[in-house]
Image (tube, grey):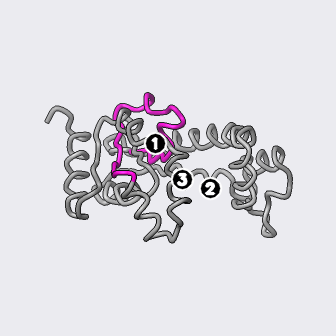
Amino acid sequence: MRVALTGGVASGKSTVAGILEELGAVVIDSDRLAREVVEPGTPGLAAVVDAFGGDVLADDARLDRPALGARVFADELARKRLEAILHPLIRARAAELESAADPDALVVHDIPLLVETGQAAAFDAVLVVDVPVETQVERMVQDRGWTREDARARVAAQASREQRRAAATYVIDNTGTHDDLRERVTEVAELLVSPGA
């Protein structure tokens, strides 16, 4: 069974991924892979430099993420060009990790932009970590020190809560306590491991 995990910014998706790992799942983190495929010496980094020029490199020959981010988030064509380079590399690396996992393991792909990139249909089950938009905004303001305007802009740049919920096989509500969250994640993990149980 191929399982995907997604959720909006500040929904608690990383916390859910951590609980799944504690429960024995193999979690394949797309954000981590996105950094891995552009490490110095990789074909990914070379392709990014070919497409965007040497000024996207920091002094240590690593990708200067803020410099690249400033360029691609201000220019949709540039963002699409970057995605065309990175997404196939990330998916290929995720497939390698999935095939290396124990055949009996619950393998969960942590993909923040699952809905936005149209990947939900590629999975047998989609877990969506869900909180109200106002909760997302409050968490970004309190935990990350963002302004309300920046927080709302980040939420608006992602799929809507309704779009994510529509893609969900299981919704994981994260408005309660950590114990409530752990109980729900455990319940969903058991359903995934023993469908029909």
Residue position marked by numbered label 3 in the rendering: 154
Q: Which residues are magenta?
A: 108-133
Type of residue at label 3?
Arg
| Camera-side mark, 3 or 2 | 3
CA–CA distance in space, label 1 to label 2: 18 Å
| Whole-percent x, y for residue 144 in the image | 49, 69
Residue position marked by numbered label 1 in the rendering: 98
Which image quadrant is residue 137 in?
A: bottom left
CA–CA distance in space, label 3 to label 2: 20 Å
* Residue at the outermost top position: 121
Type of residue at label 2?
Arg
Mark 3 closeness class: few <14, some 14–19, many ≥20 residues within 10 Å:
some
Question: Would you say the residues marked 3 and 1 are in contact, meaning their CB atoms lie under 8 Å apart?
Answer: no
Residue position marked by numbered label 2 in the rendering: 35
The answer to if 34 sits in the magenta stretch is no
Q: Nearer the viewer, residue 157 or 13?
A: 157
Q: Nearer the viewer, residue 34 or 152?
A: 152
Instruction: Name the residue: 52% across, 37% down.
Output: 116
Mark 1 closeness class: few <14, some 14–19, many ≥20 residues within 10 Å:
many
Mark 2 closeness class: few <14, some 14–19, many ≥20 residues within 10 Å:
some
The answer to if 125 sits in the magenta stretch is yes
Secondary structure under the numbered disc 3 in the rendered image: helix
Left or right for 149, reference 187: right
Question: Would you say the residues marked 3 and 2 are in contact, meaning their CB atoms lie under 8 Å apart?
Answer: no
Secondary structure under the numbered disc 1 in the rendered image: helix
Instruction: Name the residue: 35% across, 49% down.
Output: 129
Q: Earlier in the sequence, mark 3 or mark 1?
A: 1
Q: Nearer the viewer, residue 61 or 66?
A: 66
Secondary structure under the numbered disc 2 in the rendered image: helix
